[in-house]
Image (cartoon, helix red, strand yellow):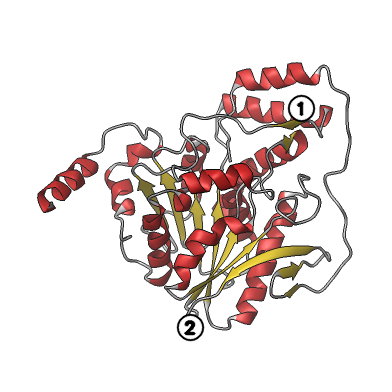
Amino acid sequence: MRFAVGIALVLAVMALLMACGTDTAPTVVQQKSALPTLGQDVMTADDGMDLPIHSWVAQDETRAVVIAAHGMNDYAGSFDQPARAWTLSGITTYAIDQRGFGRAGRRGLWYGADRMANDLLTLARLARQRHSGVLVFLLGESMGGAVAVLAAARAEPNLLAGLVLAAPAIWGKGARAELLYSAAMALSTVVPAFTVPPLSVENPSTDDPVVLKRLREDPLIIHRTRLDTLAGIVALMRNAREGAGAVAVPTLVLLGDLDRHVPRDGVAALLERLPQPGAAPGTTLALYDHGRHLLMRSLNGGRVTADIAAWMLSPGQHLPSAADARAKACPQLLLAPNRACAADRIAASAERKAQ
């Protein structure tokens, strides 16, 4: 998922659109009313749409349930690597193909953030019915993080035990961000069906060649995004930032130093609105050295997967990787990940002495 959008790109896209015709294809498909149900590999939503579900069931007794929301242009299968690891810790994961992605609905169309957030809550309720008495956590990666924020903000009391946001895609603040937001909205009304490829950024989303190969070759991955869908995602990111103040559950926010795909000032604005550290329910920030956008699907992603499991199963304890302690010791890394951190030097020195 790539959000490093520049003014030059917006102008270039506008120039391209001058030569294109308009296309007003609908981005919302109305469905009938239905009773939500959860089958083995599909969830029927309350509007009758069937949404594919990927599930990974705990090897022994289920101690916690994760409802997972994938990133832009991805699908539920993206959680296979971390979810398999969580089964060993007694965690059952249900991941959903969000509308317009994977095999859910009409591929590439935007169904609306409200509808997507409601789908996550529906799945959480159904999972809680299936696993009575087990804590249910909401987890969102990248774009899915923004959807998860909206869902958590409107969840009824006692539905969710916590919220995990892995590299959440949250819109930034300031004049430049507002200009880009306005440009995205305007362009989406001119030629909504015009598609654009992912943008190149300084660091790839992962350093795992196997994952990179999958992102290139998996037929369920979308490689060109409609402008109206892109505008919908931008609006989602902005609305998640503004609505985060209504989140009332413990929250874990994860971000890597090498992540250039999400606006870091947007994550900072999100943290200002989420429950504050030290007060119930509280928010924990974890900053990972050499961490990339796809934190759980990089070569050192095992530490992130383990941190998430520990946070869910042992609330109130420090993360095994100490990424939370690193964030407290060096808060400047949130907005300036290239700055020096004394905690990193201490950790490196301790590692050398141990060798």
Task: Label 2: state its secondary structure.
Answer: loop
Q: Quadrant of residue 125?
A: bottom right
Q: Is residue 184 above or below residue 302?
A: above
Image location (x, y in percent) of residue 147:
63, 52
Q: Is residue 287 above or below residue 312?
A: above
Residue named by callout 1: 187
Taking the view exactly as shown, the residue that stands out farthest to the left is 353
Residue named by callout 2: 61
Residue at mark 1 to residue at mark 2: CA–CA distance: 51 Å
Tell me if I can see residue 167 in this picture.
no
The tag on residue 102 is none
**Disc on the earlier residue, 1 or 2:** 2
> Which residue does the image show at 13% across and 51% down from the upper left?
355
Say whether residue 169 is left or right of residue 235.
left
Task: Label 1: state its secondary structure.
Answer: helix
User: Looking at the rendering, in which quadrant would you find the N terminus?
Assistant: top right
Image location (x, y in percent) of residue 295:
45, 49
Give the camera-side residue of 267 and 74: 74
> Which residue does the image show at 66% across and 47% down from the upper left?
221
Q: Quadrant of residue 308?
A: bottom left
> Which residue does the image show at 72% across and 41% down from the upper left?
232
Give the camera-side residue of 9 and 116: 9
In the image, what residue type sits under mark 1?
Leu
Label 1 vs label 2, nearer the camera: 2
Local packing at callout 2 (Cα closer than 10 Å; few below 14, some 14-19, many 20+) is few
